[in-house]
Image: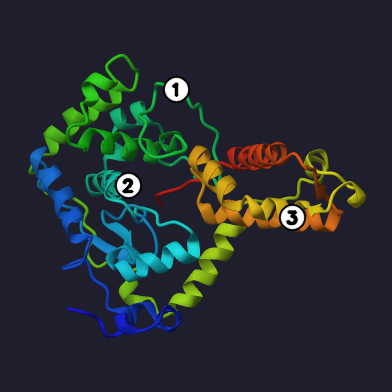
Amino acid sequence: MKQDWEKLSDDEILQKRIRDLKLQIAGSRIEPFVNQLYDELDSKGINFHPPCYLTDEWLCPDKVPAIGIPFCLAHSRLQKIEKRIMLEVEGGTENKFMKLLRHECGHAMNYAYQLYKKTRWREHFGRFSERYTDSYCYYPYSRKYVIHLQNNYAQSHPDEDFAETFAVWLAPQNKWSQKYKNWPVINKLNYIDKLMKKIGDTPPPVTAGGRLPWSAVKMTSTLAAYYERKKKTLGSEFQGFYDDSLKELFIVHPEQSEIKASSAIREYRRQIVDSVTRWTGHRKYDVNQLLNILARRCDALGLYASEDNMRYIIGVTALIAAIATNTAKNIGAR
């Protein structure tokens, strides 16, 4: 059934309170994906189906076995608005959606059965109590971790390592036993395989109950206010100016060129953003914000571009990729 707000313009929808959008998973475009997850669990002999609900981002609340799914994914109109404002939609394709859903399911299983308390769990994944940090270093070629989400996310925290390993184990037709057979991480996968067989139809000792934080049905802010907060938070992920690097890339004498460096950056904005996000895994909005910062600094420094377009395209792309890599942020889960 169509909602009354679907006929409104984007600007009018942005003034609606999120809870007044009356979004729900049942009957939405994402319900089949949730059902697919439950089918995958059934095929592995697991009776527990973590409850899914709509939130502001992908998440599994701390020690609460429930899966939060971004509310924008429940409606095509909201997904288009998200794409227009944030430049991309996290989990916007079936493949990416299911990857994130299986990852969050791993967290839910961990919390529902308190697996993190087991000695063997700690031996394989580390201490669950290890502190989360805003950034983490990773070894891109390490074979001690599965490859699933971007930025080698399994290396960010023991809880994420388990969730990533579980997601790889759960995915149908993944053939993990063959793909990882010569990797040390096969021990983690075999551990999960045996552990899940033991769990089977055992009821979980911990359930979500009524604890569903950040639920979209309770959000009183307007969609516009929500995006303002989101842009401010994501845009602050990159800090600092890189004046010396910019001076190496561009020239400081305007008589040598009529092209402002800021104009050159903006002219090739799309190519630079696409390239950096592809290889670093950062959100397009973040990279776009960093481009704006660098463009403003170029104006403040009075920098101009040479005639060699390829040189500064490569230079700016490499600079931003380096900044993004050095500030590898946690993505995709909470």
Looking at the image, is mark 1 or mark 2 nearer the viewer?
2
Residue farthest top in this picture = 182
Q: Residue at x 17, y 78 (%)?
A: 1
Secondary element at tag 1: loop
For label 3, count other residues whose C-alpha is less than 10 Å away and answer few (under 14), some (14-19) or many (20+): many
Tell me if residue 322 can be seen. Answer: yes
Q: Which residue is mark 3?
A: 262
Q: Which residue is mark 2?
A: 96
Q: Residue at x 22, y 45 (%)?
A: 113
Which amino acid type is shown beneath numbered disc 3? Ser
The answer for how far apart the CA atoms under marks 3 and 1 are is 39 Å
The answer for how far apart the CA atoms under marks 1 and 2 are is 23 Å
The part of the image, by quadrant, that contains residue 309 is top right
Secondary element at tag 3: helix
Pick whichever of labels 3 and 1 is earlier in the sequence: 1
For label 2, count other residues whose C-alpha is less than 10 Å away and answer few (under 14), some (14-19) or many (20+): few
